[in-house]
Amino acid sequence: MNQSARKQPELPERRPPASGRLPGTAPLILETLADDDYALIDSGNGQKLERYGPLTIVRPEGQAIWQPALDEKIWRQADAVFTGDTDEDGVGRWRFPKQPLGENWPLAWRGLAYLGRFTSFRHVGVFPEQAAHWRFIEDQIGAAAKSGRQPRLLNLFGYTGLASLVAARAGAHVTHVDASKKAIGWARENQEMAKLGDRPVRWICDDAVKFCEREVRRGNSYDAIILDPPKYGRGPKGEVWQLFEQLPHLIDVVRELVSDKPLFVVLTAYSIRASFFALDELMQEVFGDAGGRIESGELVIRTLDSDRTLSTSLFSRWVAQ
Ligand SMILES: C[S@@+](CC[C@H](N)C(=O)[O-])C[C@H]1O[C@@H](n2cnc3c(N)ncnc32)[C@H](O)[C@@H]1O
C-alpha cells in the first residue's frame, strides 16, 4: 500500500445546518423475525447459531455476552462454523464438520431468489436484519409504482445487491454502487438468480463519495437513497472511507442528490461505537428543513421460539411523506 492511498482527502466544508427539526420517532426498533429461509436459532458465549435455508451456521457474535439457551448438542450439529475474530472484518476460516460444502447455495426472501455464500471475514452474502429495510423499500417503491411512477433509487455500499433487487422488483430504476468488483459480480449473479435481468439496474464499481460528488456535478438526482457504509473501507482506487470522518460530508452530498419528488433516505451503520442518536442528529442537521419525518433506532433480530433479541445495527431514515 503506498502512502498516497493512505492519505485522507481534504473534506469540503459542511452545508449550513437545517433551520428546523423534523418530527419523528426515536427509538424505533425494527425487528426481523424468522422466515422460511432464515432464523436466528440461538446465541450466547460470543457466538450465534443461524439457519440459512437448509444450512445451520455458527459464527462469532461479539454482542452475545449471555449464555446460550439451547443444548450444546444442537450447536454441534451445525453444517458450517466460522472460527476467528469477533471483529466485523476479523480474519478466520470456515469449517464444515459434516461434509465439505460448496461456496454458495440458494436462498430466497419473499420469493426473491439469491445466493448465500461462505465469504472470507465470516459474512454469508446477506445481512438478514436488512429485511426490515427491504419491507420498507418494497412498500414505498411499490406504492409509487402503483401511481404510475418509476422512482429512481440509489444504493450506496450495496454489497451483494439484495436491496437493489428488492427495489427493482418493486418498480424502481436502480443505481447500485460498490467499491468491490467481486461484490458487484455476486450482485449480478443474484440478479440472474432472481430472474430480474430485464429490470433497470446500473451496477457501478466506484467509490461511494466520489460517485455522489460526480452525480451532483452532472445534475443527476434520485427519489430514494439507501446507504449502509462500513466503519472503514476502500474505494476501487484505494480511496479511504472512514465513517466518522466522512459520513457527515456524504450525507451533505446525498441531500444534494435528492430529487424534487423524494421518497426516502435510509442510513444504516453497524459495528461502530455510536448511538442511533448520533445518526438521528446528523439526519436532522441535514434534512431538518426538508419536510417529512425522521425515524431512528436499531435493527434487531428476534430469536426463533424465544423473546431474546440480538441488536445488529443502527439506522436513521428520512421519510418524505
Ligand atoms: C457490509 S456491506 C453493506 C451491506 C449491504 N447494505 C447489504 O445489506 O447487503 C459494505 C460494502 O461497502 C463496500 N465499500 C467499502 N468501502 C467503499 C467505498 N469507499 N465506496 C463504495 N463501497 C465501499 C464494500 O465493498 C461492501 O460491499
Image: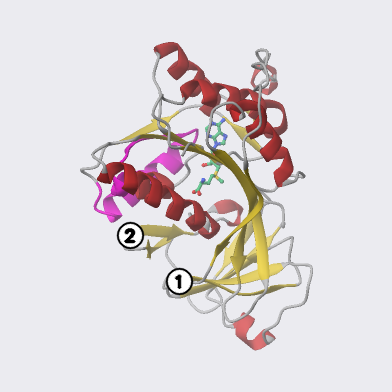
Q: Is mark 1 within 8 Å of ligand 1?
A: no
* 233 horizontally vs 142: left or right: right
Q: Is mark 2 within 8 Å of ligand 1?
A: no
Look at the numbered disc 1 and give the secondary structure of its residue. Answer: loop
Above or below 246: residue 216:
above
Above or below 63: residue 202:
above
Residue 28, by quadrant, is bottom right
**Magenta part of the protein: which range?**
168-196
Give the quarter the ligand 1 occupies. top right
Q: Position of residue 150 (x, y in %)?
A: 28, 36
Q: Which mark is residue 35?
A: 1
In the rendered structure, which amino acid carries the disc numbered 2? Ala
* 25 horizontally vs 65: left or right: left
Alpha carbons under labels 2 and 1: distance apart: 14 Å
- Residue 176 highlighted magenta (yes or no): yes
* 161 horizontally vs 97: left or right: left
- Residue 231 highlighted magenta (yes or no): no
**In the rendered image, which quarter contains the N terminus?**
top right
Q: Which mark is residue 113?
A: 2
Q: Which mark is residue 303?
A: none
Above or below 320: residue 295:
below
* 227 horizontally vs 199: left or right: right
Residue 250, by quadrant, is top right
Q: Is residue 316 visible?
A: no
Task: Specify few, some or many for label 1: CA neighbours under 10 Å numbering under 14, 14-19, or 20 or more.
Answer: some
In the rendered structure, which amino acid carries the disc numbered 1? Asp
